[in-house]
Image (cartoon, rainbow, N blue to C red):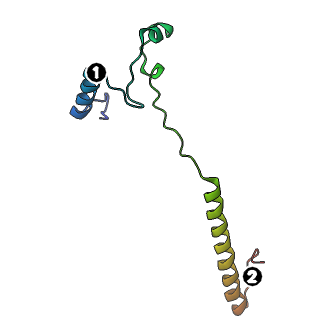
Amino acid sequence: MKGKRQNTLSEENKARIISTYKNRTEAPRYSRRVEMAEIEKNEFNLNISRYISTAVGEEEIDLAATNKTLLAIEKEVRRALKEHNQYLKELGLPLLPGAD
C-alpha cells in the first residue's frame, strides 16, 4: 500500500508471500524457482528483476479487424459530411471540402 515516505504490505500481500514461500509455488510475473547455478551465474545478485519479469505484454492488435472498423468509420464520416453539405447547400452556405 502506498505510504507517504514508505510503502507497506497489506495482510493479504503478506499472506500471499508466506504461502508462496512455504509452498514453493510459481506464478507468472510474481515468483519462480531458481537453481543455484543461475544465482551463481548472476554473481549471487538476488535483485528480483534478474529472475522475475514484471513487464506486461502489449495487447495483440487484429489489424484486419481494425482496418475493417476504420473503413466503416470512414464510410460513416463521408455519409455524414455529404448529408451536412446538403443542409449547407439548402441554406446557401459554403460547402465543406471532402464530400466528393
How many numbered discs sit on the rendered protein? 2
The answer to whether 5 appears left or right of 84 in the picture is: left
User: Judging from the image, what secondary structure is the residue with disc 2 in?
Assistant: loop
Q: CA distance from mark 2 to mark 1?
A: 70 Å
Which residue does the image show at 47% across and 12% down from the upper left? 38
Q: Position of residue 19 (x, y in %)?
A: 25, 26
What label sits on residue 21 in the rendered view?
1
Work out whether 37 lies above or below 19: above
What label sits on residue 45 in the rendered view?
none
Q: Position of residue 61 (x, y in %)?
A: 59, 50
Work out whether 42 lies above or below 98: above
- Report the front residue among 3 and 54: 54
The answer to whether 66 appears left or right of 31 in the picture is: right
Tell which circle, 2 or 1, labels the residue nearer the N-terminal end. 1
Q: Position of residue 6 (x, y in %)?
A: 31, 27
Q: Looking at the figure, which quarter contains the N terminus?
A: top left
- Residue type at mark 2? Leu
Please rate how many residues cluster around mark 1, counting C-alpha atoms within 10 Å: few if below 14, some from 14 to 19, many from 20.
Answer: few
- Report the front residue among 12 and 94: 12
Work out whether 55 lies above or below 22: below
Which residue does the image show at 69% across and 75% down from the upper left? 78
Please say if the residues under marks 2 and 1 sit with CB atoms less than 8 Å apart.
Answer: no
- Residue type at mark 1? Tyr
Which residue does the image show at 76% across and 75% down from the upper left? 97
The answer to whether 58 appears left or right of 17 in the picture is: right
Q: Looking at the figure, which quarter contains the C terminus?
A: bottom right
What label sits on residue 95 in the rendered view?
2
Q: Position of residue 47 (x, y in %)?
A: 43, 17
